[in-house]
Image: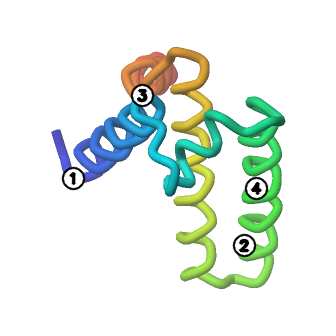
Amino acid sequence: MDDTDAVLDELFAVIEDRKEQLPEDSYTASLFTHEKGENAVLEKLGEETTELLLAAKDDDREEIAHEAADIVYHMLVLLSMKEMGVADLRAELRERR
């Protein structure tokens, strides 16, 4: 497992923990308990995607990395909401090789 795999697995483990524990001061936990339900995460994915596109248009490499990370994070939260995980993502990507 390379560093990227480890980072994704660690991040997903934190997301799963926040989903289970629901600490009051956690942004991640707030996504699982938001009154809009999964729409809160879907809206964030749309917002972050727009921000990524604008950063790409501006050739802002630092902002591209930042917004791409936001998308990955929110995508992992969505996978967790759907009772899926990083393994599902890896399996799909492997099939596409």
Q: Name the residue tied to disc 3.
A: 20
Find disc 2 in the rendering and name its residue: 56
Query: Is 88 positioned to the left or the right of 28 in the image?
Result: left
Q: Nearer the viewer, mark 3 or mark 4?
A: 3
- Compare residues 17 and 47 and report the one nearer the observer: 17
Count how many numbered circles sit on residues in the image: 4
CB under 8 Å between discs 1 and 3 = no
Residue at x 30% of width, y 38% of height = 9
Q: Is residue 41 left or right of residue 92?
A: right
Residue hosting label 4 = 49
For marks 1 and 4, the one nearer the N-term is 1
Can you tell which of label 1 and label 3 is closer to the viewer? 3
Specify which label sits upstream in the sequence, 1 or 3: 1
| Residue 14 picture location, percent across and down | 35, 42
In the rendered view, would you say 93 is above or below 7? above
Amino acid marked by disc 4: Thr
Question: In which quadrant of the rendered view does residue 59 lie?
Answer: bottom right
Report the side of 26 relative to 78 (left or right): left
Compared across the picture, whether 87 is left or right of 73 comes to: left
Residue at image coords 82%, 46%: 43
Q: Earlier in the sequence, mark 2 or mark 4?
A: 4
Residue at 73 percent of width and 39 percent of height: 34
Direction front: furthest residue: 24
Residue type marked 2: Ala
Dot 2: few (<14), some (14–19), or many (≥20) neighbours within 10 Å? some
Sequence-first disc among 3 and 4: 3
Contact between labelled residues 4 and 1, with CB atoms less than 8 Å apart: no
Q: What's the amino acid at mark 1?
A: Asp
